[in-house]
Amino acid sequence: MTKPLSRRAFLGTALSALAVPAWAGAPSVSLRPKARPGDFARSVATRGPTAPSTKALIAEAKLSGNVGFAVSDAKTGLILEEGDAALGLPPASVTKAVTALYGLDTLGPDHRFQTRLVATGPISGGILRGDLVLAGGGDPTLDTNALAEMAAALKKAGLRELRGKFLVWGGALPFLRAIDETQPEHAGYNPSLSGLNLNYNRVHFEWKRSGGKYAITMDARSDKYRPDVTMARMRIAERKAPVYTYRGKAQHDEWTVARSALGNGGARWLPVRQPELYAGEVLATFARAQGIKLGQPEISKSAPIGSALVTHRSDPLSTVLRDMLRYSTNLTAEMVGLAASAARRGKPVPLRASAREMTQWAQATLGMSGALLVDHSGLGDASRLTAASMARALGKAHKAGLLKPLLRDIPLRDARGRTLKNQPIKVVAKTGTLYFVSALAGYMTTPDGVDLAFAIFSASDSLRAKVNSAQDDRPPGASSWNKRAKQLQQALIERWGIVYGD
């Protein structure tokens, strides 16, 4: 089931204002016009008054693999320059910009995710004669502080004793053990997905050495609280490799870590693979502090029926998306995409089906021909976008005016990596990085105030084929390759700033 576009507050007629035929006549090669004379043109890396050609810039970058780019007039949608712009390349986290548009269009910028505490029976004299259910609504931002507030609100609602079970339910959205099973098991950016999430489904592991022994903690810390958890457990193993191992048990996550890798102390966030139990244990801890004993949480397979005693609402979707684009949180992207697909279909759908739904939406609404997305975060490297289709999407979204304010400022830097002060080119964009994949897409404003939309994708399939994604080690050459790709992105942006001002 798909909601009609007329019911959405976001793109509406603004997206259809730039019809696809306006892009159909885009040039297939770089136009390479000469720059206007002026102090700015002469100051760009001592290149002189004429902007270097895109071919020269790409050759200078010495990137094995492919580079696709497109830049357009953000107001008219006219493509000004492109190269291999119809070539499908991995977009990495640039995918999140498409997800943001998908979420805004389907759910609306004011949408709020809800997490509820539902009583399935009556409360009399402070006693609940029924079950209490912590019911998730797909909120990707639910944190420890929120659960502490919900526990306090539960006490204010008059609950003193629970006679039934304490249940947790995450079925509002489909469960997935990991976003991408090819990633390292202990990668915190690759957690489980559920309709009930906590702390981006990560648990804090900390270790300290004293007297030859290690003290270990596993907790759900926030800026205010550090509740210990038992559903995620760590054991030190006498080995050199692998650093971590994981086994899923019926009621807990079981980790081991190699003693040789610990040193004197440290900490890291590990993914949670049973997020409903994680959230339930933390809530029970805070409820106990309020004098309410809930007991051990049990997973419910059906949606709760009863009265909501407490409801926690997330920030508006526009705020959630701004943070997602700034910090590139994979779980947020997947939750927003899954929630949007569930709203369109009228029921939750698995991740791959949801990605296909978003792909079809992007093709139909944004004119993103050739789009192929396997998730909503860009973590899966099988996704493909073209630079032309991304520039087309950004151009169509520009008139609506809701995406650009959510994107992060991207400073231009000198050869030593220092931010250039008083740089007249302003860039807001989404970055995307995988090993031997680098992407950047967004908006730039030239020194003369001209708004441009652009997309730059670089990837080397041959080098990526040698990468073992399950290992945590950085492949040889990956760092220098990605550094050169980012330098190319800036060089192209500098060129466009010279060439396409008024």
Image (tube, grey):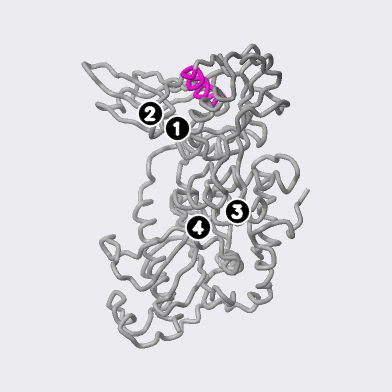
Q: Choose mark 2 or mark 1, whichever is in front.
A: 1
Query: What residue is at 51 percent from the left and 56 percent from the top?
Result: 94
Dot 3 alpha-carbon crowd within 10 angstroms: few under 14, some 14 to 19, many 20 or more: many
Dot 4 alpha-carbon crowd within 10 angstroms: few under 14, some 14 to 19, many 20 or more: many
Between 96 and 401, the one nearer to me in the picture: 401
Tell me the quarter of the image containing the C terminus: bottom left
Mark 4–mark 1 distance (CA, rounded to whole Å):
30 Å
Specify whether residue 282 is painted magenta. yes
Check contact, mark 2 vs mark 4: CB within 8 A: no
Mark 3–mark 1 distance (CA, rounded to whole Å):
33 Å
The image quadrant that residue 233 belongs to is: top left
Mark 4–mark 3 distance (CA, rounded to whole Å):
11 Å
Compared with 112, 304 (above or below) is above
Element type where label 2 sits in the image: loop
Q: Position of residue 133 (x, y in %)?
A: 64, 24
Residue that mark 2 sits on: 243
Residue that mark 3 sits on: 109
Residue that mark 1 sits on: 186
Between 287 and 97, the one nearer to me in the picture: 287
Mark 2 vs 4, N-terminal side? 2
Residue that mark 4 sits on: 406
Mark 3 vs 2, N-terminal side? 3
Check contact, mark 3 vs mark 2: CB within 8 A: no
Residue at far bottom of view: 37
Q: Which residues are magenta?
A: 277-290
Q: Position of residue 89 (x, y in %)?
A: 54, 59
Specify whether residue 29 is painted magenta. no
Check contact, mark 2 vs mark 1: CB within 8 A: yes
Mark 2 vs 1, N-terminal side? 1
Going by the numbered disc 3, the residue's amino acid type is: Pro
Q: Choose mark 4 or mark 3, whichever is in front.
A: 3
